[in-house]
Amino acid sequence: MDGTRSSVSESEPPADYLSRLNQEQRDAVETVDGPLLVLAGAGTGKTRVLTTRFAHILLTKRAFPNQVLAVTFTNKAAREMRERVGAMLGRPAEGLWLGTFHALCARMLRRHAELVGLTSGFTILDADDQLRLLKQVMDAARVDAKRWPPQALMGQIQRFKDRGLTPARLGPNEESEFANGRVGELYAAYQARLVALNAADFGDLLLYMTELLRTREDVLALYHQMFRYVLVDEYQDTNVVQYLWLRLLAQGHRNICCVGDDDQSIYSWRGAEVENILRFEKDFVGARIVRLERNYRSTEPILAAAAALIAHNEGRLGKTLRSGREDAAGDPVQILSFWDSDEEGRMVGDRIAALRQEGHSLAEIAILVRAGFQTRAFEERLITLGIPYRVVGGLRFYERAEIRDAIAYMRVLHQPSDDLAFERIINVPRRGVGDVAMRAMHLASQTEKVPLTVAAERLVASGGLKGRVREAVGELMRSFARWRELSAREGHVLALATMLDESGYTGMWQQDKSPEAPGRLDNLKELVRALADFETLGGFLDHVSLVMENEENAGGERVSLMTLHGAKGLEFDSVFLPGWEEGVFPNQRAMDENGNKGLEEERRLAYVGLTRARRRAFVSHAANRRIYANWQTSIPSRFIDELPEAHVAQSGSQALAREQRLTAPAVFPVVARRNAAWEQPARPARPDKIPVGGRVFHQKFGYGTVTTVDDDRLDIEFDVAGAKRVLDRFVEKV
DNA sequence: AGTGGGACGCTTTTT
DNA sequence: GCGTCCCACT
């Protein structure tokens, strides 16, 4: 260890919490001063290091709790760290600057809001609001939304923000074809609208704060004074603006510790830059690097398979996982070949049923897919088998319509100038406000330069609105005044309950006969209950837009179904990895759009998938898959070929079928060894070579003629089905 | 103002 | 094949 670096006296006996760490982990914890990069492979105790280091800094009195800045990507990670640090300290961890990039930036920005033209009560918009606002901006600029999808512009603006580019910082090279080169103009207009609405989107939180740290010495000095230590989780996922923000904040004391794993960088598509972690030593001169390579999670074969796979990537920092477990021996990674996706679904389901039968907990089983839509097939199968499951990562609590509506009511209450919120609820429940009335309000709002709420009141008073609409809108505006008063007098909890009631919003769902309605009412109750935990309405609104998530998924004996992205950071005894087929995984679009870089990210995703497994990993592929309307033949993923033979066991449909006493289509060639069973299967024998021009029969596509041969991949012109590419083992010579 | 039907598109996603 | 989004019709 570099003795000059660590200020812990060498003679001191190690504290109890340090003795529980291995040498590298301890190194990472005790190297407190100066920049440090902890390269933490999957399952090497990353979170333990991070939390112990945090506690260590506090326990050795290097800093007060509010002098440490600890940053994560997700609220879940932040919560976990808070709990574990609290447990180590023996008291709840309070006064910490611990949270997500966004939550921390929001907290900072509220203090300096006026420097960017906002007030401290600014609204944080979600994706939905952002898009609606952008559509309005595009409309106003007369950009044809048909030709130039607002979604695409949203994406571009988000990427600008990810890179720390304000409209003023946009270089001349940033223009694209989009909207005939008007992207910069639209971006600026969008930002102006946000300021006018006293609102910020997620990207703005970081963009504004970074801009302030860059340009305002007083702001920078304030935070340099505040934070002595900076801790960062999942550093490989940071984007440019997050990196700039961190670097600016860490400049003061230079005590920055970033933990990450370049092999698990899977978010480049949302702006993450692996380069940040690869460049760490250059960015922070004199940085130390500690590698955590002892894996305490998985068996030897799983680690070997994952290591061999990821070794195919270039430009890695280099890290070799080795097992740190005593009981690391285990089954090889199972590679299962299926005739079609239905069979894959059946077999995965059966296998899970078998595991359950053997006494394995369903909570320790996961099916990890590349894309969300793939979960459906497995859901159906699990329902049929009566196996409880949960799909992780559906709609979040605050994304539900009823929650967003209720929040919109609160937003209008809290900030009457919140036009977006007002627009959302003005006709929910129905008040007869249609296009005509809406246009009148917009017009008045624009000409008189007042928020929509004020415009609405004026139109009611002046008779600009007529009849039932006038009545209803007038009533709503009077109600808002009353609710605002109630909120000030009796508190926001009662105000929300009253507002939902008197506005007719709850009534609307009570009258709704759809099966979801009762659930929605429950969610509303939950919202009112949650509001009680907050002292102010503003604090609650921040919580909802930045933190709140799905609670209902928690706990229970259930199989987990999720995307590979969603599985990062989790672990299970048994992991099923279906759909390992070229085009599906690696995903075709990822490769088309980003070439080799895209492929490497897909491979990292595969690596993440494999390393989620503690004891059993099942990789599978199907020869035929129904995608959208029609059947597609697919060839096994190249990632399967990249797994080391010594640590995998292959089995085909037929061996499986025999074992499970199920009838499977007779498409798999007879497996060479008679005793080939599920547990010790042989690689399926290769059929006789089929020459170009040879006639073949395919179970699904019928008869055809081979046009080209590429190893075991055949291009075949089928008599009826047309040209397809299939694996030779799925056809018979005729 | 509400609804029905046709066109479209369809990777990953946190905050 | 399915869900969603938008427009046109009523």
Image (spheres, coloured by chain):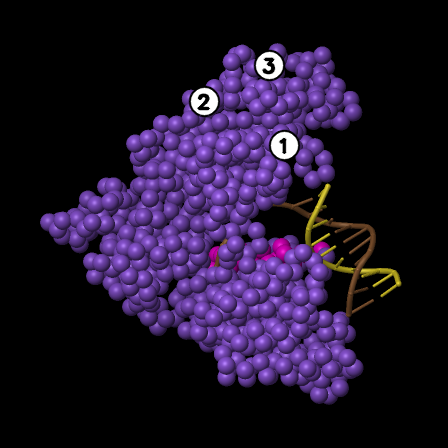
Chain colours: A purple, B brown, C yellow
Q: Are marks 2 and 1 in contact (CB under 8 Å)?
A: no
| Residue A524, horizontal then vertical, whole percent | 57, 65
A297 in relation to A236, above or below: above
- Regarding residue A611, the answer to whether it shows in the image is yes
* Image: A122 above or below A267: below
Q: Earlier in the sequence, mark 2 or mark 1?
A: 1
Residue A148, magenta (yes or no): yes
The boundaries of the magenta stretch are A147-164
Q: Residue at x 41, y 36 (%)?
A: A614
Q: Which residue is mark 1?
A: A341
Q: Nearer the viewer, mark 3 or mark 2?
A: 3
Question: Chain under label 3?
Answer: A
Residue under the image location 65 percent in, 14 percent down: A690
Residue in the foreground of this view, choosing between A351 and A632: A351
> Alpha carbon of mark 2 to alpha carbon of mark 1: how far?
24 Å
Give the residue type that dot 2 points to.
Answer: Glu
Q: Residues within 10 Å of mark 3 (few under 14, many from 20)?
A: some
**Both labels 2 and 1 in a single chain:** yes
The disc at residue A670 is 3
Residue A249 makes an appearance in the image: no
Asked if residue A526 is among those painted magenta in the image, a careful observer would answer: no
Q: Quick one: A111 or A146, which is closer to the camera?
A: A111
How many C-alpha atoms fall within 10 Å of the one at disc 1: few (<14), some, or many (≥20)?
many
- Determine which of the numbered discs, if any, sits on residue A645 in the image: 2
Nearer to us: label 2 or label 1: 1
Return the residue found at the far left: A11
